[in-house]
Structure formats: structure tokens, C-alpha cells
Amino acid sequence: MALASPCLPRAGSPLVIVVHGGGASNISKDRRERVCQGVVRAATTGYCILKNGGSAVDAVEGAVVVLENDPEFNAGCGSVLNTIGDVEMDASIMDGKDLSAGAVSAVRCIANPIKLARLVMEKTSHCFLTAHGAARFAASMGIPQVSREHLVTERNLRHLEKEKKGQQKTDCEKNLGTVGAVALDSKGNVAYATSTGGTINKMIGRVGDTPCIGSGGYADNDIGAISTTGHGESILRVNLARLTLFYVEQGKTLEEAAKTALEYMKSKLSGLGGVILVNKKGDWVAKWTSTSMPWAAAKNGKLYCGIDLGDTRVTDLKVS
Ligand code: ASP
């Protein structure tokens, strides 16, 4: 009996992955290409995982790890700095198959908070571990510590300095750069993952929306999966992820739901942000109210990516 090649997609749901690199007020010319390459690399990695039979959870984790390891993004080794120049990171992940979820907040000195969030989901009876407890759990799981220097970039030191001098934009308009992914696997399961360094010059211990299930993301096979980015204090107050999926449950298309929820947050709180969504049918959308949002998506052998409104590039997906 011939065995199916592990590289061929199995019959079933279409394979889809969408990633974002955070809502942004503007992205300088010299960063645009690097940011674009970063989201494309993450989407391609996630798609390969799906194509090789990996689950939606495997794919979103894999894609987010690529972005956490890329200093262009505000997560992992590109995290923005808090008021004392330190890195405190938040992350969450959710499996739409059974609503299992894991989150960590205010974690320091590890390379990939999303991996720790997944371990919280799979190896504990809890959903959310923070700071000291999350660090102890990471050590017990054998996650190596990295130095502060590994996570602090020159660019973020300059941003913090500017912020302290009052030269940055308002909270709602900053170039934030959180990362996230949503995916649909061949078995029809959806998942999301979101990871961030938070906001520049934040207070020690500040936790934003990213690790909060229902704000930083949500996944339910019956509705879809979503990852959010933007002004955390606004996203938290409108529960942006669950609100968007509520509109989907009410019968709106993914596009309409994303638009309605983002407009609601903007009109109520002047909060800007962005979302990526996928559903069981393989429909997907990337939408934002911030000036721009780097994103990439892979489906049916095609790769889509963009940064600003109306600049979607479509190419053939090159995967081995
Ligand atoms: N939402 C994140 C936070 O407030 C920031 C971002 O999306 O860039 O922590």
C-alpha cells in the first residue's frame, strides 16, 4: 500500500495561515522591505507546517516564533522597553477545537513567550501565568534563560529615549508592531497566537490586551480565529477579539465584522488597531484602522502580503 507523502496536503479543509506584524502609524522606507520579508517568512513557515500535516496550533506557534526571533517586530528579541529600559513580554494562544488556551504576561529573559503560553495550555490546569510564576514554570519546563542584551535592541533604546523626551506620538498612534497569526488546518481546526513586548515606556507590570483571551485573540472552530493588535488599553475595554467574532456569529462576513468592531473601538475610545481572521471555510481577512499593518497570508499555493491599504501583492507560494 502506498503511503501518502507527508508533504502533500490531505484532503479536507483548505490550508490557510494569516500573520500580522502589528498596527503601525508609519513604517520608514528602509524598514518596509525587512518588515515585508519578515511577515512573508512567518506565513511561509506556518503554511509549511500545515502542509506537512501540522495542526493549526503548531502553525500559529511556528509563525509567531519566526516573528519573535526577528528584531524588526515588537515581540521576543525586538520587544519595546518599559520605563526602566527592561523587556516584559505578553503572549497567548488558543485552540479552536476545544477552546483550550494558554497565556503568559510580564515574562522576562526568555526568547519565545509564545512557546511558554503553549506549555501553559498543554501542561497545566490553568489558562494564564504571570511574572514570577510564569518564570518558575518556564524553568521547570527547561526553557533556557536569555540575557537582557539578547532582547534589547539599539532601535528600542533610541525609541525609549525619544519617548522619555516626549518626542513620540500619542499612545493610540504609536508604531507598535505586536505579532500574531491565525490558521486553519486540514482537519478543520482553527487557532490563534499573539505575542508582544507591549507599549514603549510602559509602567513596570503593565499588561495589555495580548495575553487576555477575548481581547488579544480568540479561536472557536464554530466561528473562526482572530488575532488583534493596536492600543491595548482600548482593545481590552471592548474585548476586540470576542466582539469581532460576536459580529460573525450574528451573520456578518469576516470583513464586515472586522470593520464594525474596529470602528466601534475607534468611535468609543479613539483606539486604533488591526485584526486578522480565518474561518472554517477558509475565508480570511486582514483589516486595520491604524495607518498601516504589515500582514501576509498563504492559501491554495498563493502568497498575499501588504502593509498599507490597497497595496496587496500576490505571488506564487514557494514551499519545499
Ligand atoms: N496591543 C499591544 C499592547 O497594547 C500592542 C500592539 O498591538 O502593538 O500591548
Image (cartoon, rainbow, N blue to C red):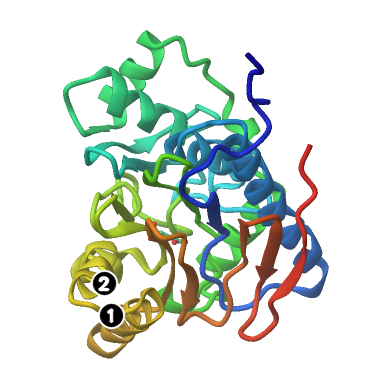
Could you tell me residue 185's position as x and y percent? 47, 43
Q: Residue at x 37, y 56 (%)?
A: 280
Q: Is residue 62 left or right of residue 257?
A: right
Examine the image and state in which quarter residue 142 appears: top left
Instruction: Give the structural element (helix, strand or loop) at label 2.
Output: helix
Q: Residue at x 64, y 80 (%)?
A: 308
Could you tell me residue 83's position as x and y percent? 44, 52
Could you tell me residue 272's position as x and y percent? 40, 78
Q: Is residue 166 left or right of residue 95?
A: right
Pointer 1 residue = 252
Examine the image and state in which quarter residue 168 appears: bottom right
Q: Amino acid at mark 2?
A: Val
- Which disc, if any, is residue 248? 2
Q: Is residue 152 visible?
A: no
269 lies above or below 4 = below
Q: Quick one: quadrant of the N terminus?
A: top right
Q: Residue at x 49, y 79 (%)?
A: 290
Residue toward you, 296 or 140: 296
Residue toward you, 301 or 102: 301
Q: CA distance from mark 1 to mark 2?
A: 5 Å
1 lies above or below 4 = above
8 lies above or below 267 = above
Residue reaching furthest front? 1
- Disc 1 and disc 2 in contact, CB within 8 angstroms: yes
291 lies above or below 69 = below
Please rate how many residues cluster around mark 2, counting C-alpha atoms within 10 Å: few if below 14, some from 14 to 19, many from 20. some
